Structures are given as C-alpha cells and as structure tokens.
Image (cartoon, rainbow, N blue to C red):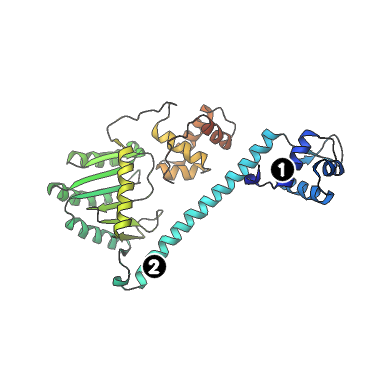
Amino acid sequence: MLTTLGLDADAEAVYRAMLARPKDGVAALAAALDLTDDQVRSALDTLSELALVRPSAEHGGRLRAVSPDLGMEMLLARQQHELSRQQQRLEASRATAAQLIADYADLRPQSDSPGVEQLTGIDQIRDRLATLTREVRTEVLGFNPTSAQTEEGMAAARPLDRQLLERGVRIRTLYLDSIRNNAPTVAHAEWLAGHGGQVRTVPTLPTRMIIIDRASAVIPVRSDDTAAGAVILTGQGTVTALCALFDSTWAAGRPLGEAPVRDAHGLTPQERAALGLLADGHTDEAIARRLGVSPRTARRITTELIERLGARSRFQAGVRAAQQGWLRGTDTGR
C-alpha cells in the first residue's frame, strides 16, 4: 500500500490500473475497479496533484500514468522534503521550548523552580562558570561544538583549567573533528592534553555542554547564540541522561592525535556523518554548521559522496546509501 506516500486506496488502484491498461478511459477504469466515475475522477485529481499522471502527448485529452520508477522517486522526494520541513519545525520548537523554560524559571522564585537556574548574557555565564569551577571536586565533562574558538575564549579558559588539573580534577572534552583544520584551536586542545586533560573528537555534537561532578549541567538556551543565555540543570534524572549522552559520545570519539579510521565503505567518521545529514535532507549550509566546516567544504564533501554513490541527485544519493548499507551506524546527533 502507498498510503504512507500520500495515495489513498482509490488513487493507488487507479494508478496501478492505468499502468496495466494505459488505453482505458474513466468509464473503463471505473468498470474494471468497481468504482463510480466520480470516484475515478477524484482519484485522478489526487494523482495529478502528486504528478503521477500527465496529459498524453500522443492522445489529446487523455491522461497517462508516469512510470513507477520516476513516480516513486518523486513521491519519496516529496515525502523527504516534508520530513525535512518537519525537522526544521521540530528544531524551532525545541529552541522555543528551551527559551520558554528559561523565561519561566526567571519569572518564578528560584525555590519554585527546582533543578533549573537561568543565566543571561556572557558575563553572567562566565561568572557562574567560574564559581562552579572553584567548587568542582572530581570531574568536568564538556561538549565543544566550535571548530574555531576565539583567542579570547581560549585565553580565559586556560587559568581555570590549569587550576582544576593541578587540583587533580579530571577534565574530558569532546571537540569536532574539524578543529584539526584550525591551528589555534588544535594548539589549545594540545595544551589541555599536555597538562593532563583528555581530548577526543567526533564528527558532530548536539550542543555545547559542561557537566560538573556529574551533578550539574550547563547548556545554552540557544544553540546558534551560546552567549545569549544558559541554564544550569541539577535534576537527577536530567543530569543522569546528559551524562549517559556524554559517555556514549566519548566512547565513539578518537584522540586528537589519532588518524581517522575509514569504515568498510571507505568513509571517514566525518564523511559518514555528512552522509547521514545529506540523507536526512539537510542543506549544505546546515551540514556545514553541524560539522563545523565552511559551506564550501560541506559542498565539496557532499559532492564527492554523491559522485562516489553514482547518484544523479542528493535524494538519489540518500536512497542508494541506504540500499548499500552506508548509513548503518550513522549518528548525526539528531
């Protein structure tokens, strides 16, 4: 049944009948399918909207069914476009929900909002992080989804990191694979590792995050503007879930000095992540943001993947990648 692709039972039956008997008109189709003429015409309207039937060039006034390979590809492309739009709406809803949570926490007394503390502005965020850093006892875990950090930010972080490491606090930080192309960020990561911190990289990260002593987590309210505001979460269930997310992502990462390992299909972790994003309908600009690379680099990666799959379009590349098993184990942080 093709109901998941937008066809009801009558439309699917008429489409199949037109493929089998291309010369039949409305009356003949109605008789063959035990439908009324109006039901057949309604089905033809649905098929026309989905571009599954077209006017015949050979027989004026008659419709013909497009071939199944082209028709199904168009239906799948339409559905994938809708899924992409739904994903964009979901991301917008998540951002709105996070903002609402932060606003609500700000409006209510702190005692009425257990487990949530709002921070507004980069100064307040830095001051609160400095306080939390002084209070940390055993461990700091971090997601850093920025491929090129500012010199100011790295300089500000080093004294605090040095103090923690000298006190015997364990620091583990996950960066994007793309930091390897930014010398200052690599230098900072190597400095951290050289002073006892542990650094790994992964192709994508869901958001910036700092977890302290597995008891509190700091995450931004907006992933596109981490300086605008943040929330500190201390609820046991929430922090436990975030710690599990960190641990699984850390296990999949690789040390900074380790060369990328290609999988059975010859894909690097970054290429595999890009392919998963491509199959999900993301644009090159969105892929660039998720990988922490330039749009030009993202276009080069996706173009090479499409060529390697022998595809004629981005959609066909996603289909072929799924058919050939290239997407198994792909993690895009969704």
Mark 1 sits on what residue? 12
- 231 in relation to 62, above or below: below
- The local crowd at label 2, few if under 14, some if 14 to 19, many if 20 or more residues have their Cα within 10 Å, is few
Percent across and percent down for residue 310 are: 56, 27
Using the rendered image of the protein, determine whether residue 296 is visible from the camera's viewpoint: no
- Seen at 81% across and 45% down, the residue is 34
Give the side of residue 271 with respect to residue 212, left or right. right
Q: In the rendering, which numbered label is found on residue 186?
A: none
**Amino acid type, mark 1:** Glu
Give the side of residue 64 with respect to residue 154, left or right. right
For residue 74, what is the image quadrant? top right
**First in residue order: circle 2 vs circle 1:** 1
For residue 129, what is the image quadrant? bottom left
Which mark is nearer the camera, 2 or 1? Answer: 1
- Seen at 56% across and 35% down, the residue is 319
Where disc 1 sits, the SS reads helix
Q: Return the residue nearer the eye: 284 or 41.
A: 41
- 323 in relation to 218, above or below: above
Where disc 2 sits, the SS reads helix
- The local crowd at label 1, few if under 14, some if 14 to 19, many if 20 or more residues have their Cα within 10 Å, is some
Q: Return the residue nearer the eye: 58 or 326.
A: 326
Mark 2 sits on what residue? 103
**Amino acid type, mark 2:** Asp
- Seen at 47% across and 36% down, the residue is 275
Percent across and percent down for residue 22 are: 81, 35
- Between the C-alphas of marks 2 and 1, the distance is 49 Å
State the count of labels. Answer: 2
